[in-house]
């Protein structure tokens, strides 16, 4: 069984740490990706019916310059998960941001929360496993984020990677 990572920089940035998730991990995630990039990422890796597919989107969809409407985000994610063969799906919710480190006019936690709710609804409707990254990283507070307030810190990945490995078994 392969573990296939799709989505945004929350997964793309762990390339060197893939062995901590499992033995056969393929990372097709890319920084800046939105829900609209999942199809191309999946085409590039040729998903199979035995793959465990982990999806992380929502943070970039919430960016004002992308402004993917939440209803479109939810519909696109649901259609994507429902139309692809996979042994199992894990949907990671967007973890939020550290607003104090972001510039004016950037993402807010209030906006990201709408995408988190939509991702949760898709996981529920598609019987996908849900990895609630916001709850997982809450104990770290602002330390969950890198200096840019958007990307995850090394401390955050120390919590996230074992949780991803666990999702390979059951989440």
Image (tube, rainbow, N blue to C red):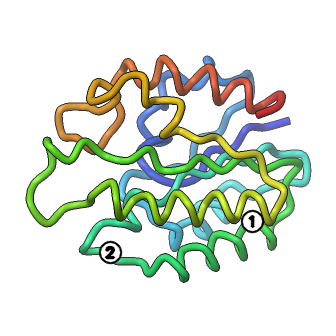
Q: In this orientation, which residue lies closer to the viewer: 56 or 17? A: 56
Q: In this orientation, which residue lies closer to the viewer: 73 or 11? A: 73
Q: Where 105 falls versus 15 (above or below)?
A: below
Label 1 or label 2, whichever comes before in sequence order: 2
Q: Residue at x 36, y 34 (%)?
A: 152
| SS label for mark 1 | helix
Quadrant where the N terminus sits is top right
Residue 36 place in picture, x, y as percent? 52, 73
Would residue 43 appear left or right of 62 to someone viewing this image?
right
Residue 128 place in picture, x, y as percent? 79, 53
Quadrant where the C terminus sits is top right
Q: Residue at x 32, y 40 (%)?
A: 151
Label count reads 2
| SS label for mark 2 | loop
Q: Which mark is residue 21?
A: none
Q: Are marks 1 and 2 in contact (CB under 8 Å)?
A: no
Q: Residue at x 53, y 38 (%)?
A: 133
Would residue 169 appear left or right of 39 to someone viewing this image?
right
Residue hosting label 1: 81
Residue 126 falls in image quadrant? bottom right
Q: CA distance from mark 1 to mark 2?
A: 21 Å
Neighbour tally class for label 2: few under 14, some 14-19, many 20 plus, Cα within 10 Å: few
Residue 109 place in picture, x, y as percent? 33, 54
Q: Where 32 falls versus 154 (above or below)?
A: below
Neighbour tally class for label 1: few under 14, some 14-19, many 20 plus, Cα within 10 Å: many
Q: In this orientation, which residue lies closer to the viewer: 129 or 40? A: 129
Residue 111 place in picture, x, y as percent? 35, 64
Residue hosting label 2: 66
Q: Residue at x 89, y 48 (%)?
A: 87
């Amino acid at each position: 069984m392969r573990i296939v990572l799709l989505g945004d920089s929350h997964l793309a940035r762990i390339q060197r740490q893939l062995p901590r998730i499992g033995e056969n991990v393929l990372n097709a995630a890319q920084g800046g990706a939105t829900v609209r990039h999942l199809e191309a990422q999946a085409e590039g890796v040729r998903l199979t019916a035995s793959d465990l597919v982990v999806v992380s989107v929502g943070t970039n969809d919430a960016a004002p310059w992308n402004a993917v409407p939440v209803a479109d985000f939810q519909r696109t994610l649901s259609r994507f998960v429902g139309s692809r063969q996979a042994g199992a799906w894990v949907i990671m919710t967007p973890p939020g941001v550290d607003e104090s480190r972001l510039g004016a006019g950037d993402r807010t936690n209030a906006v990201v929360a709408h995408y988190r709710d939509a991702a949760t609804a898709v996981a529920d409707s598609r019987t996908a496993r849900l990895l609630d990254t916001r709850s997982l990283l809450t104990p770290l507070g602002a330390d969950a984020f890198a200096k840019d307030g958007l990307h995850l810190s090394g401390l955050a990945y120390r919590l996230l990677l074992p949780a991803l490995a666990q999702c390979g078994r059951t989440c």
